Amino acid sequence: MTIVYPSPPDSIIIPDPTSDTVNAGLYTILPRLRLILEEDNAQAFLHFFQGNMHSMAWDLVTPETLLHIIIKNSVRCAKAVLEGGAPELQGLRAYPNCVTSRSTRLPRYSLST
């Protein structure tokens, strides 16, 4: 099944379709999730995801979940959710072009001095 979300015709960024209740659920499990992300343990992440899918997925791995993976620089976990395919994800994956309103408020860094 392909999911298509409305976005401006010239934009590759799509808005976050996630329900507010799912994002609220993520924040209840976030302290435990952060510990896994700090270790960058993909197997532990996938096991945790499987038990907490109701708080981390909404037709896709939520952009808010991916945002926290990126914030913690959890490269192995990011690879797992971006590729999908792991049985624990049950056919879901993260879409890097789907952003949260929060991710657009992150500080911008410049390489110029």
Image: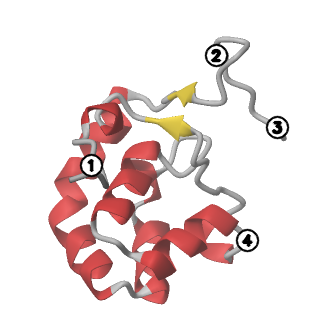
User: Residue, x 31% and y 76% (percent of image)?
Assistant: 37
Residue sitting at x 58%, y 73% = 79
Q: Is residue 53 left or right of residue 86?
A: left
Q: Which disc, if any, is residue 2? A: 3
Marks 2 and 3, how far apart in space? 15 Å
Q: CA distance from mark 4 to mark 3?
A: 15 Å
Tell me which numbered mark, 4 or 3, is placed earlier along the sequence.
3
In terms of image quadrants, where is residue 7? top right
Residue at image mark 1: 109
Tell me which label, 2 or 1, sits earlier in the chain.
2
Q: Mark 2 or mark 4, which is nearer the start of the sequence? A: 2
Q: Nearer the viewer, residue 113 or 31?
A: 113
Residue 38 point in image, percent of width and height: 25, 80
Residue 38 vs residue 89, the one in the foreground: 38
- Mark 3 → mark 1, Cα distance in angstroms: 35 Å
Measure the alpha-carbon separation of dots 4 and 2: 26 Å
Please state the horizontal and vertical placement of residue 106, each as a whole percent of the image: 25, 41
Residue type highlighted by circle 4: Gly
Up/down of 5 relative to 100, above or below = above
